[in-house]
Amino acid sequence: ITKILGRRKCSICNKSFNINGVNTDGFDMPAMLPEGECKLGCNREVDWKKRDDDTNDIIKLRMEVYHKETKPVLKYWEER
């Protein structure tokens, strides 16, 4: 959830970034930040936007739906 909450997209250059790094339970996913300055003059504090649906509650709901609806289908096809 921490990694998903770190998603950002620049409204100027349209590039995607992730401000959150995660290093836990064998997963090492560093933040994905730009190298150097943007040639279009993007300002991280102003131009990087977070998705409206990237909230703790909505992400938890997405995970519940995945475990209830998608995971059983994957298991079914793995067993074939």
Image (tube, grey):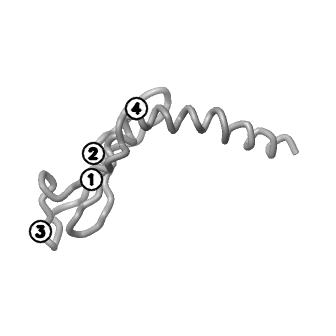
Mark sitting earlier along the chain (4/3): 3
Res. 74 image quadrant = top right
| Residue at 29% over, 58% down | 9
Verify CB contact (< 8 Å) between mark 2 and mark 1.
Answer: yes
Coordinates of residue 1 in the picture (x, y in percent) = 41, 34
Q: Which mark is residue 33?
A: 1
Give the quadrant of the C terminus.
top right
C-alpha separation, residue under disc 4 versus residue under disc 3: 34 Å
C-beta proximity under 8 Å, tags 1 and 4: no
Tell which tag, 4 or 3, sits nearer the viewer: 4
Query: Residue shown at 37%/45% (left/top)?
Result: 53
Q: Which residue position holds label 4?
A: 57
Local crowd at mark 1 within 10 Å, few (<14), some, or many (≥20)?
few
Q: Position of residue 71 (x, y in %)?
A: 68, 38
Mark 3 or mark 2: whose residue is earlier in sequence: 2
Q: Residues within 10 Å of mark 3 (few under 14, many from 20)?
A: few
Q: Earlier in the sequence, mark 1 or mark 4?
A: 1
Q: Give the labeled residue for mark 2.
A: 19
Kind of residue at badge 4: Asp
Label 3 and label 1: CA atoms lie apart by 15 Å
Given the image, on which type of amino acid does mark 2 rest? Ile
Find numbered disc 4 in the image and state the secondary structure of the residue it sits on: helix
Q: Give x and y (percent) for residue 75.
A: 76, 38
Real-space CA distance between mark 2 and mark 1, rounded to the nearest whole angstrom:
7 Å
Q: Are marks 2 and 4 in contact (CB under 8 Å)?
A: no
2 vs 1, front mark = 2
Q: Nearer the viewer, mark 1 or mark 4?
A: 4
Instruction: For the residues labelled 3 and 2, say whether their Cβ atoms are less than 8 Å apart.
Output: no
Residue at image point 23% right, 60% down: 35
User: Which residue bears the numbered disc 3?
Assistant: 41
Marks 1 and 4, how far apart in space?
25 Å
- The furthest residue to the bottom: 39
